[in-house]
Image (spheres, rainbow, N blue to C red):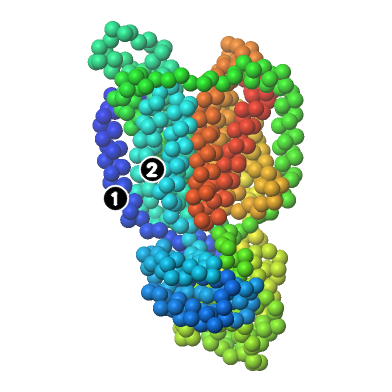
């Protein structure tokens, strides 16, 4: 069957190339028509009380005006200049409101804070015009500004260029020709365009997915090109090349080598893609549906990449054959002799190290700090922390109860301000109007057909015991004073909901990922012990990543943890599969030591090439965004991939040698 498919791929390579090219061009046009969603609440599970409340707000408060805001901070403004600055800020085009308070939330340590409400969206030309005016006319007194945009932001083109340059540099260094890397990038580029265009069938995708999908697709599937090219070169050498061949004979020779290469590499590429796809699709079972969306888009991308390797790369390689030959170069081979000697002599020690490392990290990872909200801090936040808003959605018939809540909530020290159209039973000292988007709410916007809104602003962090304690107190007041159903909405509410369900969800996702990958590897090796060993090895790298970040004093973003687990288990286990497959193959005719040596020689370049691409590209991508959530997702993948590669190259070989009787 594989031979027939390989023959079709090679014989009809031009037609397949043109079909794929057409699909890529069409999908490029569709890509710009895919709506981008920045509202993370749509991904909350249907069982979430906050999600139910958000749906009611969207239905009843369609004319709710939230506005977009920019915070501007000045250093040591003379008292007589403060009103003049406020008036000047109010005259800037697209600024509809300027807010400034004289208490500690607007004046502190010589700094003055002004909040500008805009009539335009974040990232629009209107906002850029405001920022240009601020820099041109208000640069005195150490002025700094920052908008309150919570979306992921667009990836700068220069970052994409840097990431591509790094990928190309790695490929060029590890390849046998200066041309091969560009052919690999072209083939995966076709796949990326098709994947991004076919997202239109999902309706819309989040800005998070849109931001990271393309480069992650490239780094997760680049090794398929390396595998096919390596096998193609082996077949060229095996069949021999006569210097007297004319051009037509040379093409036929390349076609025969390519047909064999496609047939021989198909199992490796398909199984590699399948493990990655299975690992990513497990994200579908996350309660927070953003993970499922990312999983679907990346899994789809990996499958499309696999197809493009067979429909695009053969034509590119054969057509550029003479150029590949002319730009040939030497490659640096790994020190396979010294590495294999080290692994063989220390195989039992390395097996003990693996067992101890798994047990050690499995215990310590339970102490890792998990975070559920991540916002980009600015220099303004160090002086004037952003206010934490909680919205109470309640039935209109409960206005009297809301009055009692207003009276009691004044006694709570973290409360900065409250916006409501209900008067408290006892006078409430509102410290100042909210310095945020909610400050533009008009009174008649707080009442819908069946529900009303009350906005409580505090100076508490978005998550943590103190924030959750305040939320519990507010929930108690609502429960005691409101007769109808009510809903609490805000970042702290979402974080608290996730903190309650996440431990069980993490255990479920870990188990599902491990079992799914185990089954795929089981069919690959027809052995129970080998997939168990490889799954435990990659799971150790996940645990090690959690422990390392905890020792560094870092909180681990929950989505980063779930994604790194799925991606590592789905993608880096391929490297372990490649090495183990070579080891089993060579052990049929060689002893343990020479089998280890040949396995290093055969797999080292593929593992290191793909591994370096994942690590370095995700590091660069992590620095690309102002949004720290995406940054940590990428950096966590980089840390996890580094741990996995080190374990595969330095621990797995010795462990295979120690457990040889169970592996072969």
Residues at marks 1 and 2 touching, judged by CB atoms closer than 8 Å: no
Of callouts 1 and 2, the N-terminal one:
1
> Depth check: 623 or 278 in front?
623
Disc 1: which residue: 29
Q: Quadrant of residue 16?
A: top left
User: Horizontal placement of 313 versus 397: left or right?
Assistant: left
Residue shown at the point (53%, 39%) measured from the top left: 616
Relative to 461, is 33 on the left or the right?
A: left
Residue 192 numbered mark, or none: 2
Rendered position, 18 above or below 479: above
Neighbours of disc 1 within 10 Å: few (<14), some (14-19), many (20+): some
Nearer to us in this view, 552 or 504: 552
Residue 408 on image: x %, y %: 68, 85
| Percent x, y of residue 604 | 55, 24
Quarter of the picture containing the C terminus is: top right
Tally of numbered tags: 2
Is residue 570 in sight in this rendering? no
SS label for mark 1: helix
Q: Nearer the viewer, residue 568 or 553?
A: 553
The structure residue drawn at horizontal position 57% and vertical position 42%, both measured from the top left corner, is 638
Image quadrant containing the N terminus: top left
**Residue 44 seen:** yes
Q: Position of residue 662 (x, y in %)?
A: 67, 23
Which numbered disc covers residue 11? none
Report the front residue among 158 and 29.
158
Q: For the point 70% across and 83% down, which residue is it? A: 411
In the figure, 611 relative to 500: above or below?
Answer: above
Q: Secondary structure at mark 2?
A: helix
Q: Position of residue 247 (x, y in %)?
A: 25, 15
Residue at image position (65%, 36%) is 536
């Amino acid at each position: 069957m594989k031979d027939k498919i390989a023959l079709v791929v090679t014989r009809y390579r031009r037609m397949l190339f043109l079909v794929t090219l057409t699909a890529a061009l069409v999908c490029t046009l569709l890509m710009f028509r895919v709506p981008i969603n920045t509202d993370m609440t749509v991904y909350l599970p249907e069982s979430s009380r906050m999600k139910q409340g958000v749906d009611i707000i969207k239905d009843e408060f369609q004319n709710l005006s939230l506005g977009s805001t920019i915070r501007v901070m000045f250093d040591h403004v003379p008292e007589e200049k403060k009103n003049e600055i406020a008036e000047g800020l109010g005259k800037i085009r697209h600024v509809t409101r300027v807010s400034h308070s004289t208490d500690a939330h607007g004046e502190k340590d010589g700094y003055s804070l002004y909040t500008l409400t805009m009539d335009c969206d974040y990232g629009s030309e209107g906002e850029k015009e405001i920022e240009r005016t601020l820099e041109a006319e208000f640069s005195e007194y150490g002025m700094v500004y920052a908008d309150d945009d919570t979306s992921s932001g667009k990836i700068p083109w220069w970052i994409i260029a840097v990431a591509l340059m790094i990928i190309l540099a790695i490929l060029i260094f590890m390849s046998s020709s200066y041309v091969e890397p560009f052919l690999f990038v072209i083939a995966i580029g076709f796949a990326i365009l098709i994947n991004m265009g076919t997202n239109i069938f999902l309706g819309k995708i989040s800005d998070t997915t849109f931001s990271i999908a393309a480069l992650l697709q490239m780094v997760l599937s680049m090794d398929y090109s390396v595998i096919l090219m390596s096998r193609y070169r082996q077949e060229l050498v095996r069949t021999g090349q006569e210097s007297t061949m004319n051009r037509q004979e040379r093409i036929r020779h390349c076609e025969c080598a390519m047909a064999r290469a496609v047939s021989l590499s198909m199992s490796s590429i398909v199984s590699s893609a399948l493990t990655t796809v299975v690992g990513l699709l497990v994200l579908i079972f996350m309660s927070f549906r953003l993970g499922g969306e990312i999983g679907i888009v990346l899994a789809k991308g990996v499958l499309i990449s696999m197809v493009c390797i067979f429909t695009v790369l053969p034509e590119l390689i054969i057509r550029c054959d003479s150029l590949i030959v002319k730009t040939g170069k030497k490659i640096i081979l790994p020190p396979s002799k010294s590495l294999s000697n080290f692994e063989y002599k220390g195989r039992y020690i390395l097996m003990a190290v693996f067992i101890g490392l798994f047990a050690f990290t499995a215990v310590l990872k339970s102490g890792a700090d998990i975070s559920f909200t991540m916002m980009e801090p600015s220099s303004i936040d160090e002086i004037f922390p952003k206010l934490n808003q909680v919205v109470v959605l309640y039935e209109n018939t409960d206005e009297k109860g809301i009055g009692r809540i207003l009276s009691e909530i004044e006694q709570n020290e973290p409360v900065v301000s409250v916006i409501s159209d209900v008067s408290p039973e006892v006078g409430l000292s509102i410290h100042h109007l909210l310095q945020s988007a909610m400050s533009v709410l008009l009174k008649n916007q707080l009442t819908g057909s069946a529900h009303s809104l009350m906005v409580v602003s505090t100076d508490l962090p978005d998550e943590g015991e103190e924030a959750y304690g305040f939320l519990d107190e507010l929930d108690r007041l609502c429960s005691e004073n409101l007769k109808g159903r009510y809903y609490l909405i805000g970042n702290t509410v979402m974080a608290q909901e996730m903190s309650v369900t996440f431990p069980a969800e993490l255990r479920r996702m870990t188990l599902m990922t491990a079992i799914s990958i185990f089954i795929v590897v089981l069919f690959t090796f027809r052995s129970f012990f080998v997939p168990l060993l490889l799954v435990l090895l990659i799971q150790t790298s996940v645990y090690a990543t959690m422990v390392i970040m905890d020792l560094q004093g870092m909180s681990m973003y929950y989505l980063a943890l779930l994604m790194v687990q799925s991606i590592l288990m789905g993608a880096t286990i391929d490297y372990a599969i490649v090495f183990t497959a070579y080891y089993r193959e060579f052990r049929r005719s060689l002893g343990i030591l020479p089998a280890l040596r040949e396995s290093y020689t055969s797999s080292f370049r593929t593992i290191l090439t793909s591994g370096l691409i994942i690590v370095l590209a995700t590091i660069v991508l992590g620095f690309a965004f102002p949004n720290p959530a995406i940054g940590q997702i990428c950096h966590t993948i980089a840390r996890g991939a580094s741990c996995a590669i080190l374990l595969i190259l330095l621990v797995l070989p010795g462990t295979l040698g120690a457990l040889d009787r169970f592996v072969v």
